[in-house]
Image: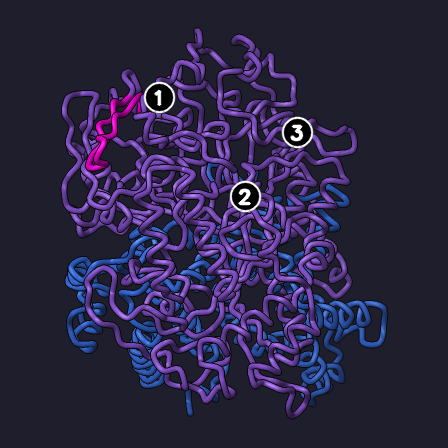
Chain colours: A purple, B blue
């Protein structure tokens, strides 16, 4: 800068110039943001296909007159969510991004209506009467994205084997060890081009409804990808490129940032997308997501429950796969099994060094010097029950969650399920809770404090920063009222988690712990992560021989009603021991701009799915859609061959 | 002068090595890294699988050997893979660094363009409207937390006025000129506080210089105001803001964590936050090292600039 050229009188001008530059930039950018109109050629699209997935998440749009007009081009939908985690490619031994939710990846089975194990890439299957193996016929004519040809049995067998760490020790796919438990080290075989056979090492009735399903817990599934692509391009290439079979294919995907996915340029075997492009942005800040929805920069956004009332009042359209996440408190350190269920070896514990009020020691009844006539286990049970009784669940729903949500009393068991028995509710009774703590030998002491307790906020629902954090604060407040001084911990889950994996943590945890999903059927085996079966991996921090027994019984029980009976016993046990009292269930809801989206039917499952079903609210006669025809398959065409005597695969009650 | 530079350079290298040791050591303090590989839900890892992974990742070797192995790979540009998805960290950084640098650069320019002229103006026009304006900007800039400024900026300029986009850096494929609108809110939010610092520093330095004897002499000799301000006063007063500038730029590079989160800016800051949440120590160590390096380089440049501008430094 030539200093001589400047004069004192010009100084204000220099400041003004800075402002002008900003204004220019605004003007420059605004021009770019003007929505463009797509090529008017091409034929109009039809409305949603009646043969598509079940309508579990549709709603009538409110008037969108006061809401923003979408910024996107016609046919393009932008969604904002908190994160976009996972590997961008389709290498089966890595935890993939949720391609199954984005309509990119497809599994053997998927929920449909009330049926959790409707066939998707599978066409039919035959289960051996002794439950030792299953032969699955896969669908013919399913094309991989790009030029990778038709999906065959060899691809599907390779995917499952590559995921299974008993066969591929390098696999770190999410919940990969479930495949290890289910199939052992026996590879899935391709019998011919369209038939695979899998041998069960430990049969689990959820093999189709969950483990090989589009909505599998923990993200593990059997998403089909091309073995030929792997053979020709190698593992490194597959890490970065997703070769799926769904109605959308990946244009670009950057982990934790953004992804662009476009409708496949051919007739999809299952459903042609109603939109041309689906974009996903990771926007961790709630205020920013709200702003993007309000300005039309986003067509659909994940919104915290506390803001649901606001966006509903404004006229935004709720869309969801219907999954409520239960939030309950688990009490790590209650390790009650004597031997490792996997190896049979005796276990040693480090959690019984000091007496902790919420931890019972079954191996030393006098541990912690409980009051006369009471052992350590009973004493801790009274404490946990008091903590369960002291919380006004309705108040949390009303004041923290904006009136949206349902109460939960025992984790894994929905109070909205027809099988729920109100006798297992923990009444809101602060006096009763105080009496239990007095009885347990924890009277109010100095400063009216009985004892101190930490409460770690688990990773779901945004962790400590999201609604879970506020629910944890509320629970901590109720516990404080009891004289139990609560420290709510909101640091990174990844720092807390090693204590759960290593079975060393004694800090209570607010979580759903995998199975605490409102929509999960009552009869599904529950409590795997409360046993030593998951040693070497994640657990809720507690281990119980009784839960192990019920879990194993339910997992291998083919009869639905028998499994319901087993889980009713589990419910009674979990209620009695208050080992995982639930508090509230939080709906996972997304909200769409009704000026962008008029309808988004989804199948039952986690958060959202099936963007191919999005029906645009905008005039779509100008879309650049050039597909010649559609051949859509109605669910009635899906053959569903099950050994009816087993009852597996039929929709369980609730 | 050469000895001065050499001394600063050696100090920077020692600091960098110490930083690598600290970063590597802290990454292991968090606990057994193998536990991080146990994925969510379901059955756990078998001892055989743990052994396989340990061997592949070199975690079966003594810690000192692991450090040297890590350093060896680092020098070859191999920053390792993320724990969550085994994506090469170098790839992630390559994707993220441009966005952070772009935001740092625009914020730096904004801070300089706003802070220094207003600081001079405020000093020259002491007690006038311009002085009060400058001091108000400084006061608000230093008093208001950046996340609040960011959110308020989104609320007012994006939601209420609909002038600017509420977040993100726009489409990655779009030309930079068309993405300017996305820069404005994050730039102002990030640059306001340093602009205030520049303003205050420039103002106080100018006031001090303007009160010095040689300025009085120049005035007595009848030198024009312009010449006094720009040739004699400003040149001497700029010394402090200039040395602050290098550190400020480093601060922009490392200090974008909050801004990137609020505006969903696709930079290193957001990557780091995600790595913290995932306890992804390969990514964390890489980003911390990157920041350490940025600080050291810019600090070194500040030392050089300082020595160049102030003979007392280079001659001492």
Is residue B174 at all visible to an observer of this figure? no
Which element type, helix, strand or loop, lies under badge 2?
loop
Q: Residue at x 56, y 55 (%)?
A: B106
Choose top left, top right, bottom left or bottom right for residue A651.
top left
Residue A501 pos. (x, y %): 34, 65
**In front here: A46 or A633?**
A633
How many badges with numbers are in the image?
A: 3
Q: Which residues are magenta?
A: A122-138
Q: Residues within 10 Å of mark 2 (few under 14, many from 20)?
A: some
Residue A629 pos. (x, y %): 44, 7
Q: How many angstroms separate mark 1 from mark 2 (CA)?
A: 27 Å
Q: Residues within 10 Å of mark 3 (few under 14, many from 20)?
A: some
Choose top left, top right, bottom left or bottom right for residue A35.
top right
Q: Is residue A537 magenta?
A: no
Which element type, helix, strand or loop, lies under badge 3?
loop
Q: Residue at x 67, y 83 (%)?
A: B209
- The residue singled out by tag 3 in the image is A59
Q: Which mark is residue A640?
A: 1
Earlier in the chain: of badge 3 and badge 1, it is 3
């Amino acid at each position: 800068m030539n200093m001589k050229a400047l004069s004192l009188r010009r100084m204000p001008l220099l400041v003004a110039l800075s402002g002008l530059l900003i204004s220019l930039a605004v003007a420059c950018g605004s021009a770019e943001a003007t929505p463009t109109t797509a090529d008017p050629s091409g034929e109009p699209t039809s409305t949603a296909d009646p043969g598509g997935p079940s309508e579990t998440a549709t709603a009538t749009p409110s008037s969108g007159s006061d809401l923003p007009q979408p910024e996107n081009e016609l046919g393009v939908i932008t969604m904002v969510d908190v994160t976009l985690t996972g590997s961008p490619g389709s290498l089966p031994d890595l935890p993939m991004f949720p391609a199954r939710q984005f309509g990119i990846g497809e599994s053997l089975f998927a929920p449909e209506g009330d049926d959790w194990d409707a066939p998707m890439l599978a066409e039919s299957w035959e289960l051996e009467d002794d439950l030792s193996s299953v032969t699955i016929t896969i669908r013919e004519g399913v094309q991989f994205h790009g030029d990778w040809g038709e999906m065959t049995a060899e691809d599907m067998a390779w995917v499952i084997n590559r995921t299974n760490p008993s066969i591929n020790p390098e696999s770190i796919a999410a919940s990969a060890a479930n495949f290890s438990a289910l199939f052992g080290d026996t590879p899935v075989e391709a019998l011919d081009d369209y038939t695979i056979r899998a041998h069960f090492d430990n049969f689990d009735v959820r093999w189709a409804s969950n483990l090989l399903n589009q909505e599998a817990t923990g993200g593990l599934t059997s998403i089909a990808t091309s073995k030929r692509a792997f053979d020709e391009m190698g593992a490194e290439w597959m890490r970065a490129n997703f070769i799926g079979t769904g109605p959308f294919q990946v244009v670009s995907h950057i982990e934790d940032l953004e992804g662009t996915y476009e409708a496949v340029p051919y007739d999809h075997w299952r459903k042609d997308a109603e939109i041309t492009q689906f974009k996903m942005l990771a926007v961790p800040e709630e205020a920013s997501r709200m702003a993007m929805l309000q300005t039309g920069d986003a067509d659909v956004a994940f919104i915290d429950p506390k803001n649901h009332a606001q966006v509903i009042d404004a006229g935004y359209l709720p869309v969801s796969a219907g999954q409520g996440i239960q939030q309950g408190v688990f009490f790590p350190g209650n390790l009650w099994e004597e031997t490792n269920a996997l190896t049979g070896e005796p276990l040693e514990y480090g959690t019984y060094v000091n007496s902790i009020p919420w931890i019972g020691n079954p191996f030393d009844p006098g541990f912690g010097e409980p009051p006369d006539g009471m052992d350590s286990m009973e004493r801790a049970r009274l404490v946990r029950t008091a903590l369960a009784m002291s919380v006004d669940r309705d108040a949390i729903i009303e004041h923290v969650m904006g009136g949206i949500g349902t109460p939960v009393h025992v984790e894994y068991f929905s109070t909205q399920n027809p099988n729920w028995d109100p006798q297992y509710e923990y009444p809101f009774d602060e006096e009763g809770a105080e009496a239990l703590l007095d009885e347990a030998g924890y009277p109010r002491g100095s400063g009216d404090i009985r004892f101190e307790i930490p409460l770690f906020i688990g990773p779901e629902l945004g962790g400590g920063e999201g609604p879970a954090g506020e629910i944890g604060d509320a629970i901590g407040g109720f516990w404080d009222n009891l004289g139990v001084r609560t420290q709510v911990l909101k640091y990174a889950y990844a720092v807390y988690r090693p204590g759960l994996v290593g079975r060393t943590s004694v800090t209570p945890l607010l979580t759903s712990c995998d199975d605490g999903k409102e929509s999960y059927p009552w009869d599904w085996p529950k409590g795997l992560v409360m046993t030593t079966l998951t040693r070497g991996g994640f657990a809720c921090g507690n281990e119980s021989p009784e839960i192990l027994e019920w879990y194993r019984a339910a997992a291998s029980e083919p009869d639905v009603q028998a499994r319901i009976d087993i889980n009713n016993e589990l419910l009674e046990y979990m209620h009695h021991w208050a080992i995982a009292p639930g508090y509230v269930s939080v709906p996972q809801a997304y909200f769409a701009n009704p000026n962008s989206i008029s309808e988004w039917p989804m199948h039952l499952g986690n958060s959202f799915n099936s963007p191919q079903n999005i029906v645009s609210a905008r005039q779509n006669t100008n879309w650049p859609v050039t597909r010649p025809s559609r051949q859509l398959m109605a669910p009635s065409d899906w053959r569903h061959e099950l050994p009816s005597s087993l009852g597996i695969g039929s929709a369980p009650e609730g | 002068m050469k000895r001065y530079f050499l001394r600063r350079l050696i100090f920077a290298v020692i600091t960098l090595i110490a930083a690598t040791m600290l970063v590597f050591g802290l990454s292991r303090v968090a606990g057994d890294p193998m536990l991080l590989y146990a994925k969510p839900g379901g059955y756990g890892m078998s001892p055989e699988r743990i052994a396989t992974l340990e061997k592949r990742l070199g975690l079966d070797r003594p810690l000192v050997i692991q450090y040297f192995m890590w350093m060896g790979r680092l020098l070859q540009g191999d920053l390792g893979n993320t724990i969550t998805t085994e994506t090469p960290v170098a790839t992630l950084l390559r994707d993220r660094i441009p966005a952070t640098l772009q935001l740092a650069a625009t914020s730096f320019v904004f801070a300089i363009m706003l802070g220094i002229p207003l600081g001079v103006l405020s000093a020259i026009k002491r007690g006038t409207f311009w002085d009060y304006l400058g001091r108000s900007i400084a006061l608000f800039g230093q008093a208001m937390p950046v996340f609040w400024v960011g959110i308020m900026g989104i609320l007012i300029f994006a939601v209420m006025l609909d002038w600017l986009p509420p977040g993100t850096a726009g489409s990655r494929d779009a030309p930079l000129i068309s993405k300017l609108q996305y820069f404005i809110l994050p730039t102002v939010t990030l640059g306001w506080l340093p602009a205030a610092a520049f303003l205050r520093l420039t103002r106080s330095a100018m006031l001090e210089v303007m009160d010095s004897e040689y300025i009085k002499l120049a005035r007595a000799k009848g030198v024009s105001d312009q010449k006094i301000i720009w040739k004699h006063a400003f040149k001497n007063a700029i010394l402090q803001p200039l040395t602050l500038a290098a550190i400020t730029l480093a601060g922009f590079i490392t200090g974008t964590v909050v801004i990137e989160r609020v505006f969903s800016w696709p930079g290193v800051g957001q990557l780091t936050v995600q790595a913290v949440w995932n306890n992804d120590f390969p990514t964390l160590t890489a980003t911390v090292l990157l920041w350490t390096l940025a600080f050291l380089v810019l600090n070194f440049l500040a030392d050089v600039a300082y020595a160049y501008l102030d003979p007392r430094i280079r001659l001492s």
